[in-house]
Amino acid sequence: MFSFFKTKKPMKDVPSLKVDVHSHLIPGIDDGSRTMEESLSLLQGMKDLGYDKIITTPHIMKDSYCNTPEIIRNGLVELRVAAKEKGIDIIIEAAAEYYLDDGFLDHLERGDMMTLEGKYILFETSYFAKPLQLEEMIFEISAAGYIPVMAHPERYRYIKDPEREYSRFKELGVLLQVNLNSLGGHYGKTAKRLAEFLSRSGMISFLGSDVHGKKQVDFLSDMLKSEAYGKIYLNNTILNNTFNTRT
Ligand SMILES: [Fe+2]
């Protein structure tokens, strides 16, 4: 693997990540886990990495994944039952990763949003084109009483002027959720560079695994021991562990 993982000693006084806020572990409803067996193996993998609580976030996307709160909640119940039967001792909750398409405002209007801890809405956009109504949709999320959280801001190719564009999101009240694996290059050089920028600039509020399959769990195992992970805590206030870990 990458040389910096091997040469650096683990940093002291770095909190271990107990709560994950972004993953795709409900089987068969998006591009994440395909079967219950796979989901259980991924959950066990997360538990082995030290996580106590997983808030899994299936995609809600008009053209590809027409998931509803009902579908997600039913999937969550099945996943919890299967995990319990298998003896995997981990808290599982569900929210959603909302794609900001032209169906998003309908969800917001209808209410019954799948939130993180009752108040945060995790959203993503196209990787390539910034939605024309992005600021308006962010405003509507806030106006409805939620806190918008942008999933993996380092992965959007339309970010050309990171300082200006990320600062603008912050001004709009958006919290940023970086994928920890981006800092190790899992999503390529540009995402790594932008994640490093966000870490240095103190703009990160949440870390996510964005687990879709085994390769992200394996990669995370190295990342959680890396210097890059330790460095995040020097400049950023990470909120993951402030979430409730009691059942
Ligand atoms: Fe995701």
Image (cartoon, grey):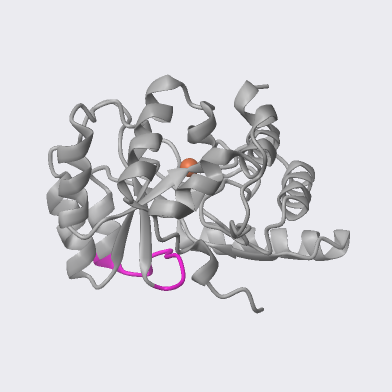
Identify the residue at image location x=37%, y=65%: 120
Q: Is residue 112 magenta?
A: yes
Q: What is the number of callouts on the image?
A: 0
Give coordinates of residue 73: x percent, y percent: 56, 64
The residue stretch that appears in magenta: 109-118
Q: Main secondary structure of the magenta part?
A: loop
Identify the residue at image location x=78%, y=60%: 83
47 displayed left or right of 226: right
Res 153 → quadrant: top left
Location of the N terminus by quadrant is top right
- Whether 83 is drawn above or below 162: the answer is below
Give coordinates of residue 90: x percent, y percent: 73, 64
Identify the residue at image location x=20%, y=38%: 163
247 displayed left or right of 182: right
Residue 109 in sight in this render: yes
155 displayed left or right of 162: right
Give 193 or 45, whichever is nearer the viewer. Answer: 193
Location of the C terminus by quadrant is bottom right
Residue 209 in sight in this render: no
Give 48 or 29, whichever is nearer the viewer. Answer: 48
Give 171 or 60, whichever is nearer the viewer. Answer: 171
Name of the residue lying farthest toward the bottom = 246
Identify the residue at image location x=22%, y=43%: 166
Give coordinates of residue 52: x percent, y percent: 68, 64
Q: Is residue 20 magenta?
A: no
Name of the residue lying farthest toward the right = 86
186 displayed left or right of 9: left
Give coordinates of residue 58: x percent, y percent: 51, 49
